[in-house]
Image (cartoon, rainbow, N blue to C red):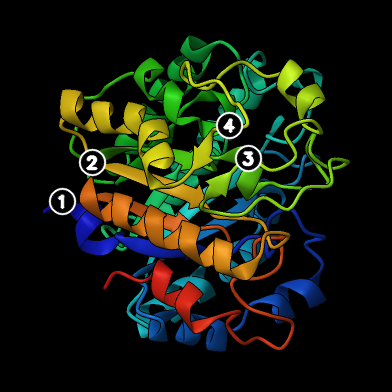
Amino acid sequence: MGIIFDKYRSGINLGGWISQSSLEKEHIETFIKKEDLEKIASWGLDHIRLPFDYPILEDDENPFSYKEEGFKILDKLLGWCKDCSLNLILDMHKAPGYAFYNNSNNNILFSDEKIQKRFISIWREMAARYKNERDNIIFELLNEIVDAHGDTWNKITRKTIEGIKNIDNERYILLGGSNYNSVQELNNLEIYDDEYIIYNFHFYEPFLFTHQRASWTPLKNIDINQPYPGKIEGIDKLKTFFGNQKPEQGKSMTAETVFDKNFIEYMLSPAIKFIKHTNKELYCGEYGAIDHAEIDSRINYMFDMKELFEKYRIGRASWTYKGMNFSAIDGNGNSISEKYIEALTIK
């Protein structure tokens, strides 16, 4: 069956905990607790994707020296996962010299060999520490690459994989592409003849639905309430947005465009072709719809995503468990909807 559909079939992200957060002690100790893992397991999910930022493990002022308190956080989560029969993906969300939300001038990982050595060294340290935790931990090298030159990333990943494999030749590694881990970039990744290298992408199509009124996007000032399924709302308001966008995979947007499962399946076509042509397992590390969307539309969307992931045997983790504008729980820690949770689960 393969490790993805066997052990990483449907999970959820723990975004905002030790990534894209203050990393202060109080936040780390209170944002996620063992009870959260127990709740996630009770929903019927089989794994956690953990975004982490490198400063929990290494300070810029003291490179190549690793912080035990940071590894204690990872070890504690791993213990909780084992107790709850959940598997774990360790996703480096922010690396030395790189963050997906920085502009390219600040992302020196792709051009600075000294920074690259730090990046590789962190993963070698992880490989050494977790060598006895094999198929219950997968390493995801880096979140959402924005480097425009895919071959640069291929060269870095090749060195990183070699560094990890020199320590643990049976370590499962997740590898994603450029343009924010776009499904369209899968074919630009180097294909390894190695069962332990698994390819992944992120999927937030249709963007007009999943990111409607998102404050960090060009949609922030466009007041629309986009349903799913349904035709595009407020096409006139979106003229400026469309003016800066290329048609996705040749699919132009008009007032008659319908966002539905057929649309999603079309947008997933690069992933479907990738599986067919490479015979590789595929994993979607992030998908979901913003909480600006009506709850019924979010539920409809997540059910359609579930059906397509199951149809093409793509493992996945929804974004995200708590907060971050895509939350699966409310302010009281309860699920936003039983139907929403059902849409995340394997059954």
Earlier sequence position, callout 3 versus callout 4: 4
Earlier sequence position, callout 4 versus callout 1: 1
Residue at 27% across / 58% down in the picture? 134
Residue at 51% across / 50% down in the picture? 287
Examine the rendered structure and indicate whether residue 146 appears above or below residue 237: above
Earlier sequence position, callout 1 versus callout 3: 1
Task: Say which of 339 and 52 sits in front.
Answer: 339
The residue under label 1 is which amino acid type?
Gly
View extreme (front): residue: 256
Image location of residue 295, percent across then percent down: 61, 69
Residue labelled with disc 4: 180
In terms of secondary structure, where does tag 2 sit?
loop
Neighbour tally class for label 2: few under 14, some 14-19, many 20 plus, Cα within 10 Å: many
Residue labelled with disc 2: 281
Q: Using the numbered discs, state the Cα–Cα distance from disc 3 to disc 4 in whole angstroms.
A: 24 Å
Examine the rendered structure and indicate whether residue 269 appears above or below residue 123: above
Check contact, mark 2 vs mark 1: CB within 8 A.
yes
Q: Looking at the rendering, which quadrant does residue 282 occupy?
A: top left
Residue at 35% across / 58% down in the picture? 306
Q: Using the numbered discs, state the Cα–Cα distance from disc 4 to disc 2 in whole angstroms.
A: 20 Å
**Of marks 3 and 2, the one in the foreground:** 3
In the image: residue 28, left or right of residue 5: right
Residue labelled with disc 1: 2
The residue under label 4 is which amino acid type?
Tyr
Image location of residue 73, percent across then percent down: 60, 69
The residue under label 2 is which amino acid type?
Glu
Q: Using the numbered discs, state the Cα–Cα distance from disc 2 to disc 1 in whole angstroms.
A: 7 Å
Q: Using the numbered discs, state the Cα–Cα distance from disc 3 to disc 2 in whole angstroms.
A: 33 Å
**Of marks 3 and 4, the one in the foreground:** 3
Neighbour tally class for label 3: few under 14, some 14-19, many 20 plus, Cα within 10 Å: many
